[in-house]
């Protein structure tokens, strides 16, 4: 055997030992990587640029209410639901309705949906009387429109005549968009691309109650939340949708709060409740104006419901709307 090769294992071991000592251990601790990082100057765009072409890639919403202390526990919002194959569990075209109003939700930005809506009008031979860049096609047969959906990356498509939805037109639109994918050519649609992070805003009131402010009308929010709760609140004894009332714009759910999930064995043994139990919470939507809705969580049981419980539940629910 070549004498040089005999030393290879020793060299490898020495390299590993040296690497392990570099951070006083065998595992790389990255907590100190950015301790001495310096803030760089902000990017300055040239004068005379088109403001509508630029926006924050990762916007950070303004904080409302009191600042949490370092001793408080932070609970990250729930991740997007995944199907067994790893894909997002939703259809490209979905129906929404509340009362007599009906519309479609398309899983693509309005700028992608708008040219497809124009293609639909041409393919059906509709007599277009007016076309608005804001996403409205006025035809002799009815009014077609597209606007930003409540969730990021979604669009709402409507077909109505004299203010009433046309069922046959919605059926045809559903078939039209179902036969297409989200790879349509992009087109500019000013004022439509508003990220959902800009829409949902947490706020703590003077009373300590947490609420979510949503700058959209209450019917649109209720319809979307109804669809998402029906799909997500289906886990027995953890989170369940019990009732929903479109007239009152509220939902009754059975939910295992963060306080209940955090009870230790000793707390359970010393408590009258010998097992972890969910409790009934009412999710209430309140209209604050034509395009302003407030979401709050109201305890419907005799069990304790803390501010942290309300915040964690509202984080989960609002996560369904992103």
Image (cartoon, rainbow, N blue to C red):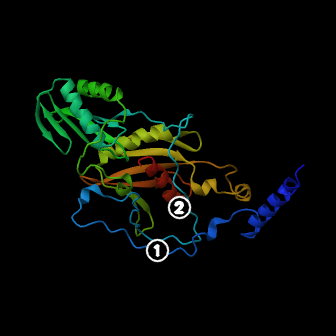
> 70 above or below 179?
below
Q: Which residue is mark 1?
A: 39
Instruction: Describe residue 131's horizontal placement relative to residue 62 as left or right.
Output: left
| Image location (x, y in percent) of residue 304 | 56, 58
Q: Nearer the viewer, mark 2 or mark 1?
A: 1
| Image location (x, y in percent) of residue 137 | 16, 36
Instruction: Describe residue 4's horizontal placement relative to residue 197 as left or right.
Output: right
Q: Nearer the viewer, residue 170 or 28?
A: 28
Q: Nearer the viewer, residue 169 or 243?
A: 169
Q: Nearer the viewer, residue 63 or 148?
A: 148
Q: Which residue is mark 2?
A: 308
Circles 2 and 1 in contact, beta carbons < 8 Å = no
Ranked by sequence position, the earlier of labels 2 and 1 is 1
Q: Residue furthest front?
A: 2
Q: Does residue 45 appear in this view?
A: yes
Q: Dot 2, crowdedness within 10 Å: few (<14), some or many (≥20)? A: some
> 308 above or below 96?
below
Give residue 213's mark.
none
Q: Residue at x 30, y 26 (%)?
A: 176
Q: Residue at x 21, y 38 (%)?
A: 145
- Residue 185 falls in which quadrant of the image? top left
| Image location (x, y in percent) of residue 26 | 76, 63
- Residue 107 falls in which quadrant of the image? top left
Q: Dot 1, crowdedness within 10 Å: few (<14), some or many (≥20)? A: few
Q: Residue at x 81, y 63 (%)?
A: 14
Q: Residue at x 40, y 73 (%)?
A: 41
The CA span between labels 2 and 1 is 33 Å
What secondary structure is marked by label 2?
helix
| Image location (x, y in percent) of residue 31 | 63, 68
């Amino acid at each position: 055997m070549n004498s040089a090769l005999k030393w290879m294992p020793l060299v490898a071991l020495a390299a590993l030992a040296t690497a392990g000592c570099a951070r006083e251990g065998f595992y790389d601790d990255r907590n100190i990587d950015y301790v001495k990082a310096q803030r760089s100057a902000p990017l300055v765009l040239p004068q005379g640029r088109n403001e509508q072409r630029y926006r924050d890639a990762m916007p950070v919403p303004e904080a409302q209410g009191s600042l949490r202390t370092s001793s408080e526990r932070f609970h990250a919002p729930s991740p997007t639901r995944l199907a067994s194959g790893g894909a997002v569990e939703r259809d490209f075209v979905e129906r929404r309705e509340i009362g007599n109003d009906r519309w479609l939700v398309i899983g693509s930005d309005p700028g992608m949906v708008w040219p497809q809506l124009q293609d639909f009008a041409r393919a059906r031979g509709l007599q277009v009387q007016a076309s608005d860049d804001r996403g409205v096609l006025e035809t002799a047969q009815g009014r077609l429109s597209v606007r930003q959906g409540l969730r990021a990356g979604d669009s709402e498509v409507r077909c109505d005549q004299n203010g009433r939805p046309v069922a046959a037109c919605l059926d045809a639109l559903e078939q039209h968009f179902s036969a297409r994918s989200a790879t349509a050519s992009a087109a500019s649609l000013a004022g439509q691309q508003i990220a959902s992070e800009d829409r949902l805003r947490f706020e703590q009131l003077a009373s300590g109650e947490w609420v979510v402010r949503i700058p959209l009308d209450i019917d649109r929010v209720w319809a979307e939340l109804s669809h998402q709760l029906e799909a997500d609140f289906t886990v027995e004894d953890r989170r369940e949708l019990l009732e929903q009332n479109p007239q009152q714009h509220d939902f009754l759910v059975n939910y295992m709060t963060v306080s209940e999930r955090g009870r230790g064995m000793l707390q359970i043994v010393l408590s009258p409740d010998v097992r972890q139990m969910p409790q009934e919470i009412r999710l209430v939507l309140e209209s604050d104006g034509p395009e302003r809705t407030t979401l709050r969580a109201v305890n419907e049981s005799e069990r304790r419901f803390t501010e942290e419980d309300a915040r964690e539940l509202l984080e989960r629910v609002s996560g369904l709307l992103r």
